Amino acid sequence: MSLVATNKIDETKYELEIAVDAESFEKALQNAYLSARKKINVNGFRKGKAPRKMIEQLYGEAVFYDDAVNALIRTDVTPAIEETDYELIDTPELNVTSISKESGVNFKVVITVKPEVEISDYKGIEVEKVVNAVTDEDVDNQIQALRERNGRLVTVEDRAAENGDIAVIDFEGFKDGVAFDGGKDSNYELALGSHTFVPGFEEQIVGKKTGEEFTINVTFPENYQMEELAGQPCEFKIKLNEIKTKELPELDDEFVKDATEFETLDELKKDMKSKLEERAANTADIEAETKLFEALIEKLSADIPQVMFENKIDEMVRDFEMRLSQQGLNMEMYLMYTNMDMPAFRKTFEEQAQKQVKVRLALEKIAELENVQISDEQVEEEIKKIAEQYNLTPEKVKTIISPKSIKADLKVAEASKIVKDSAKFNG
């Protein structure tokens, strides 16, 4: 095997010419014959005992070529690609340009590689950091939410239903006078004003009293998941069985003692304000870091192949599918519920994927410029951390994530620290 030539197609594509000599091709043909002969029947020979020349005469000289070429791709072509030291970002496009027993096999392989990256002025980037002040209203909203969580539902007897009430209803839906599947339920508890039902449904219950029976008319949204109802006018027959409202506890020290670990309302407010301020500071840090890396992207110069963005989207989709499976869902169900197809779903990740790819390229280049070094000991320590986090052995982690990949991630992390430590956060 030899790499005959490397031809540059564009900034991120190269064509490799790889030759495998006749002797290596002959060995691959013989191995292909030995592997396949037990499946071939030839009259006059026991199964698996027919000579190779006899089989080639019967089925053609090229009968074992495909298997031999596939073997050569593994044993000769792939190592030749790896010897170039190019970092591939896509599956190589491989073609056989000539093949014969006398001359061997010649391949042309088109590879897509990571782009050349330029970056400068990555230290001392100025970023505005805004920490939102915590107001008394913010604290009051937190306390109100605590009261809501500790409230109790009581039945309303003396008034009509209002937004914010729980309406306990029987309902049945009809389209063109015919009841449709899934449109019926009894003693359903509907929070009025929650907008969980078809637009206009809840609004027509407001003002009705317990015991009333009535009909409401709605039109289903055009993008409704049940196609037979999408955009269609329908009517619902309703019976209002009960109206409930949430009764909130009195806001005093007794309530605080019962609902929290604090003794007084003042202590609770002080703690809430402290936590809200801490949260505001953390949010400001995250937003400032996001601005910092957006500014870093602007300093990046690279001709990035679209496949890098698509690969990142693939990764994001796989992660999303895994999270769905943990909730007992699958992608087909999710797309149906959200009324999206896969291309539209992938597009939702597009902007985020582009940013992540660009930031990664920028940080890899910074690690190179700063001559960041990661020792084998640091890699082993990181492998141990991952093993402990996922309850795996270090050996198992190495079969899932290569040490080379871990070293690259550690270099990027160190480059990120260089950028953040040198940044100037104003505000």
Image: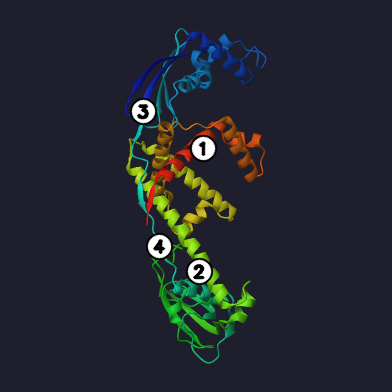
Point out residue 74 in the picture as x, y percentages from the top left corner. Answer: 53, 22
Image mark for residue 223:
4
Name the front one of labels 1 and 2. Answer: 2
Mark-to-mark CA distance, 3 and 2: 57 Å
Point out residue 187 in the picture as x, y percentages from the top left corner. Answer: 58, 78
For marks 1 and 3, the one nearer the N-term is 3
For marks 1 and 2, the one nearer the N-term is 2
Q: As shown in the figure, which amino acid type bears the numbered disc 4?
A: Asn
Which quarter shows the C terminus?
Answer: bottom left
Mark-to-mark CA distance, 1 and 3: 28 Å
For marks 4 and 1, the one nearer the N-term is 4
Disc 4 element: loop
**Residue where numbered disc 1 is placed:** 410
For marks 3 and 2, the one nearer the N-term is 3
Disc 3 element: strand
Mark-to-mark CA distance, 4 and 2: 43 Å
The residue at 51%/51% (across/down) is: 331
Name the front one of labels 1 and 3. Answer: 1
**Residue where numbered disc 2 is placed:** 273
Asked if one can make out residue 29 in the rendered structure from this viewpoint, the answer is: yes
Q: As shown in the figure, which amino acid type bears the numbered disc 2?
A: Lys
Kindly indicate the quadrant of the structure image that contains residue 369: top left
Name the front one of labels 3 and 2. Answer: 2
Mark-to-mark CA distance, 4 and 3: 43 Å
Q: Residues within 10 Å of mark 4 (few under 14, many from 20)?
A: few
